[in-house]
């Protein structure tokens, strides 16, 4: 059996994971504690580490069984084949969450094709971080003539 990356509708990760568990399919939906802010309060809530994705450990020939679940979009594909994740990578994520070690060294082990080299990438591509705030960052992508603005999640 292999771990596959299952794409699900946004905010349906927990529901899909619960249904898969009830079907006796091994599922991994890593959750982190995050601070959510509203105008009158803030609260610590559990949110998926990977938005719109869950990992399923299922035999190749039974992969189609998940399509009967409401909220499932399909499998993530890489180079025309279903993306598979090794047990080592799943264990790294589990340890990462369990030990609260949210660091880039562990995260870089999960990326098989490229290491994280954001600084070199920014310098090579004449792009750069234009603004970093407490809760967001803006990056200029010259080659695409675009400014990317991303809100950062506060993880506790």
Image: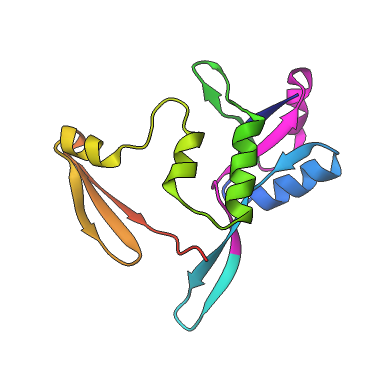
Measured as percent of width and height from the top left, residue 78 is found at: 51, 22
Residue shown at the point (63%, 28%) measured from the top left: 86
The quadrant where residue 92 appears: top right
Left/right of residue 64 with respect to residue 95 in the rendered view: right
Measured as percent of width and height from the top left, residue 43 is found at: 55, 75
Is residue 6 something one can see in this rendering? no
Q: How many marks?
A: 0
79 to 55, vertically: above or below: above
In reply to whether residue 54 is colored magenta, the answer given is yes
Residue shown at the point (44%, 38%) measured from the top left: 108
45 to 5, vertically: above or below: below
The quadrant where residue 72 appears: top right
In-front residue for pair 96/5: 96
Q: Residue furthest bottom?
A: 40
Q: Which residues are magenta?
A: 46-71
Is residue 140 something one can see in this rendering? yes
In reply to whether residue 137 is colored magenta, the answer given is no
71 to 100, vertically: above or below: above
Left/right of residue 103 with respect to residue 122 in the rendered view: right
Measured as percent of width and height from the top left, residue 47 is found at: 58, 58
Residue shown at the point (21%, 58%) measured from the top left: 131
Left/right of residue 91 with respect to residue 35 in the rendered view: right
């Amino acid at each position: 059996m292999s771990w596959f990356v299952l794409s699900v509708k946004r905010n349906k990760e927990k529901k899909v994971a619960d249904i898969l568990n009830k079907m006796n399919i091994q599922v991994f939906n890593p959750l982190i504690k995050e601070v959510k802010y509203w105008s009158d309060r803030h609260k610590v809530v559990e949110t998926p580490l990977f938005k719109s994705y869950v990992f399923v450990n299922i035999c190749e020939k039974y992969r189609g069984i998940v399509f009967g679940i409401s909220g499932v979009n399909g499998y993530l594909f890489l180079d025309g084949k279903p993306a598979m994740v090794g047990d080592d990578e799943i264990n790294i994520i589990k340890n990462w969450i369990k030990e609260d070690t949210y660091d880039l060294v562990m995260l870089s082990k999960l990326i098989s094709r490229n290491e994280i080299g954001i600084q070199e990438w920014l310098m090579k591509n004449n792009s750069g971080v234009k603004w970093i705030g407490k809760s967001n960052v803006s990056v200029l992508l010259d080659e695409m003539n675009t400014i990317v603005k991303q809100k950062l999640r506060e993880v506790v």
